[in-house]
Amino acid sequence: PAPPPPPLQHARPAPRPTPPQPRRPQVAEQAPVQPYSPPVAAAPVAPAPAAAPARAASLSPSFLGQISAALRRVQRYPMGARARHSEGVAQVTFTLMRDGTVLGPRLSRSSGDEELDTEAVSMLQRANLPSLPSDYGDSQSMTVPIRFSLNR
């Protein structure tokens, strides 16, 4: 007679290897994190970096509000950008003269849409900005974020 077959052993599946965890690089120092402040349509107005005197950082909130209001009054949403549902924030830099005249408006950061960028610069040419307060000299360089949003 033939010997009985060996008892069947159930094969267990091999354990799945765990995927390697991504390694975080060790950082000796981290740069300080700047607080985020969301851009607002034509406000707040901030002095242009390195071009403005130290006093520029202390422009009064009421004066900045006047500039924001003047820019909002002339803001238009370009039809092509509206049709494309394009939104964004363009930053424009300019020099405000004592009498409220705007000199050298230029795009300093794109919104990502050429039509919105063009409108942001055009706004400064159309706006009737307030006169610069006397304690800020004859002119003041400023950078202004201008928000274009379809859901206002």
Image (cartoon, rainbow, N blue to C red):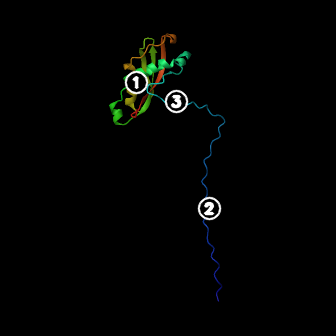
Question: Quick check: 73 above or below 152?
Answer: above
- Quarter-of-image position of residue 35: top right
Report whether residue 111 is seen: no
Q: CA distance from mark 3 to mark 1?
A: 19 Å
Q: Position of residue 19 (x, y in %)?
A: 60, 54
For label 2, the crowd category at 10 Å Cα-Cα, with few meaning under 14, some 14 to 19 and many 20 or more, is few
Residue type beneath disc 1: Arg
Kindly report which numbered mark, 1 or 2, lies closer to the viewer in this rendering: 1
- In terms of depth relative to the viewer, which is nearer, 115 or 1? 115
Helix, strand or loop at disc 2? loop
- Give left or right: position of 55 versus 102: right
Callout 1–callout 2 Cβ contact below 8 Å? no
The disc label shown at residue 37, or none: 3
The residue positioned 54% from the left and 18% from the top of the image is: 58
Q: Circle 1 is placed at which residue position?
A: 72
| Along the viewing direction, whichever of 152 and 90 lies nearer the viewer | 152
Taking 115 as reference, is 3 above or below it? below
Which of the image's four quarters has the C terminus?
Answer: top left
Question: At label 3, which amino acid type do we have?
Answer: Ser
Would you identify the image quadrant in which residue 68 lies?
Answer: top left
Q: Which x, y percent locates residue 28?
A: 66, 36
Is residue 40 in view? yes
Disc 1 to disc 2, C-alpha distance: 64 Å
Report x, y in % for residue 80. 33, 33
Give the residue displayed 43% in from the left and 11% down from the top: 99
